[in-house]
Amino acid sequence: MNDFDVPEGIDVLRVFCGPDGRHGNPLGVVRDGRGYPGDDTRQALARKLGFSETVFVDDPERGVVDIRTPGLRLPFAGHPLVGAAWLLDLEFLEMPVGDVEARQDGEFTWITARPEWAPPRTLEQYASVAEVDALTGPPDGEGWLYVWAWEDEAAGRVRARAFPRRHDGIDEDEATGAAAMQLSARLGRALNITQGRGSQILTAPAPDGMVEVGGRVLLVLAS
């Protein structure tokens, strides 16, 4: 549903927008999760919307949210939590894996979490930005793949693309906070990542093995 023809009660955001406000990963946010009780009902809506993730808000004050892809429930994901923190103006989000801290810093919304909270994925370095850009679709293979190359290693600038390879209709993920966190943790440094068509994701190592990830969020459709 790329035209954002969504039912009432659902906001649509774009998370990790570029400096010009374009791109970013679409996110559906169901403000009142009580309207979609039960696993089957929520999964059916996530599948119908067709976004890489949809968030169901179960307690807006405590920041309790439920994240769904078109095919499964996630214990943690980056772009849905950045979007939910921005929309609901939260300082903490309660997830099954642990509490996620959130903050606003000018035009950027940040969350701090453990990279290992995200499902495992393959981080594959390519030799050049041109090789990353040349991909016309998911490379052969199974499992979540994040391909990346240095655009400017000294400045921490990275070019990346993400391929869930879950066979759920999402061939390429436009902007992926969890994978960016995992890459930042592996490299042990702050990164400025351009992903997909032109989304921007920022990361920074934090104390105790945690990583911050942040970006711009825009409201596309209000319920």
Image (cartoon, grey):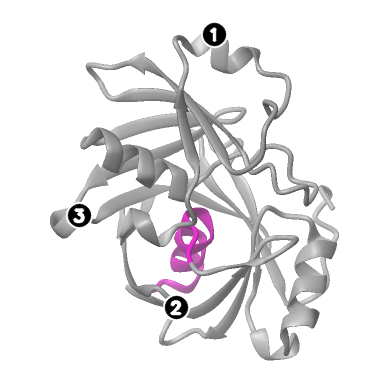
Residue 123 sits in which quadrant?
top left
| Quadrant holding the C terminus | bottom right
Instruction: Give the secondary structure at mark 1.
Output: helix
Q: CA distance from mark 3 to mark 2?
A: 19 Å
Stretch of the chain drawn in magenta: 76-90
| Residue located at (65% from left, 84% from top) | 33
Mark sitting on residue 209: 3
Q: Is residue 69 above or below residue 178?
A: below
Amino acid type, label 2 = Pro
Q: Position of residue 210 (x, y in %)?
A: 24, 56
Q: Position of residue 180 (x, y in %)?
A: 41, 41
| Residue located at (51% from left, 54% from top) | 79
Instruction: Give the secondary structure at mark 3.
Output: helix
Mark sitting on residue 130: 1
Q: Nearer the viewer, mark 1 or mark 2?
A: 2
Amino acid type, label 1 = Ala
